[in-house]
Image (spheres, rainbow, N blue to C red):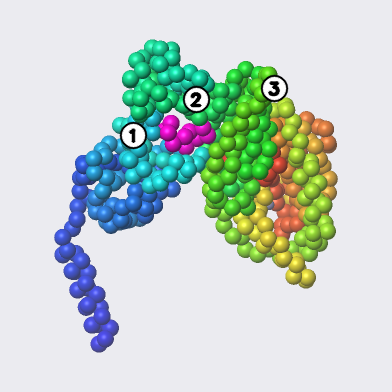
Amino acid sequence: MVKIFTAKKFYFLILIVLLLPFQPAQAQDSTGPIYIVQPGDSLSSIASRFNVSLNDLLAANGITDPNQLTAGQQLTIPGLEGVTGILNTRFINFGDSYRSLIRQTQVSEDLFKRLNRVVSPSEFYVGVNMIIPEQGENQNQKRISPNTGESLLELAVKNNIDVWTLADINHLQGSWDGLPNDTLFAPGESSGESTSGLPSAFISAEIRDLPIKQGGTGVIQVTTQPDVTLGGLLVDHPLNFFLNDDGTQVALQGVHALLEPGVYPLRLDATLPDGSKQSYEQLILIISGNYPEDPILFVDPATIDPASTEPELQELVNITLPSTTTKYWNGGFISPAIAYAESTYFTSRFGNRRTYIGQGNGLTINGFHTGLDFGGGDGLAITSPAAGVVVYTGAWTVRGNATVIDHGWGVYSGFWHQSAIQVNVGDFVEQNQVIGLVGGTGRVTGAHLHWELWVNGVQVDPLDWLIQAYP
Ligand SMILES: [Zn+2]
């Protein structure tokens, strides 16, 4: 009896739900601004970003199923009276300052703070995503940088506009508060070249693929005045710059997979031909790589004994430390398992948090997976993912039969656990050339290829290098 009663009650509830007024996917409220959903957004992250309640956001858009959100979808943002049009997102790049962005976009400071919940200019990090109303983006403006000591009047004359227009566009109180080395905007086509806030030795600086994740590769691309030598620092790694084909100077720098997400310094140091120096430093946001936890691995205790792991790691660090000024690779890297495996046949990805326990002695070490593992067994051909010079071959306790290839510019590939090494130190190898065979030597639970990539002294996610070309 009880069961029947419950079932009846259940059907009754369904009936009530069906009889409730159905809320149609209504036309969007035309009074609020539109936000275009970005990959990785959720309704709750969007609600919290604009400081509105999730319910208000759902109601304003007639959304009944919060799980149905797709990138590119247009959402009306309620509670932003007086704001219309599309809200764009933009990553803050190196050299962007709070002042320069306000000026460039012609958005009022109040509105900018309201949209981004920014309390002070100090919250302005490289890699932070800011929201800017599209109508505020003025396409017909160019950046102009006054020289030290130059007055606003001189600048106006030089750019063929009147001083009052220049003051107005840049929200200056009068013609007198232009700052040395500050960036101003003038009517005209944007050259897209000069970056704000940077000292005069720099023409522009761009950090690619912001924000950088743990285990990511930072690409710092700088255009300078002629004969300027560059150095710098990302987190705590000194940067090595190389001359790119397009005349820019480029530094590639890995970010450690275990680095705590947060803000870290990025500094550029310029040495001018006369020996004088200029530096610029800004904080950069490093985000989580969202790496999962692997199941605990039980291995031969000898392979996790610090007495053997530490000297081996130190040897590898020393091998991958020099920055060869020749860039041997060209374009994208290709999978070293391309000869036998689907390009997506990975048995373990980079960054996974790992715990190893020694069989028999219980010795435990914590770390992360430093490379990309490919499925496939003993004897399959390993090919070089890019051209380079072989700088190490040998048998290691943890890594087994190992080969290290120098691709130049501080980029190195390591191939572990091989059953056979088929190259010698000093050999130049072409992309896709066979360099060895898959095996199960060293600290493994079965035969597989482990490929890892070092960028200026730090292991990075090799998958990034298969997906896109660097620099
Ligand atoms: Zn591996």
Q: CA distance from mark 1 to mark 2?
A: 23 Å
| Residue displayed at 16% across by 65% down | 19
Res. 215 in view: yes
Sooner in the amino-acid sequence: mark 3 or mark 2:
2
Q: Residues within 10 Å of mark 1 (few under 14, many from 20)?
A: some
Q: CA distance from mark 3 to mark 2?
A: 22 Å
Work out which quarter of the rendered image holds the N terminus and state it: bottom left
| Residue displayed at 54% across by 31% down | 206
Q: Amino acid at mark 2?
A: Pro
- Side of 352 relative to 394 (left or right): left
Residue 369's disc number: none
Circle 1 — which element? loop
Residue at numbered disc 3:
275
In the depicted structure, whether residue 416 falls above or below residue 195: below
Q: How many marks?
A: 3
Work out which quarter of the rendered image holds the C terminus and state it: top right
Residue 180's disc number: 2
Q: Nearer the viewer, residue 201 or 351?
A: 201
- Side of 471 relative to 12 (left or right): right
Find out whether residue 93 is within the magenta segment. Answer: yes
Q: Nearer the viewer, residue 459 or 5?
A: 459
Q: Amino acid at mark 1?
A: Val
Residue at numbered disc 1:
107
| Residue displayed at 67% across by 57% down | 367
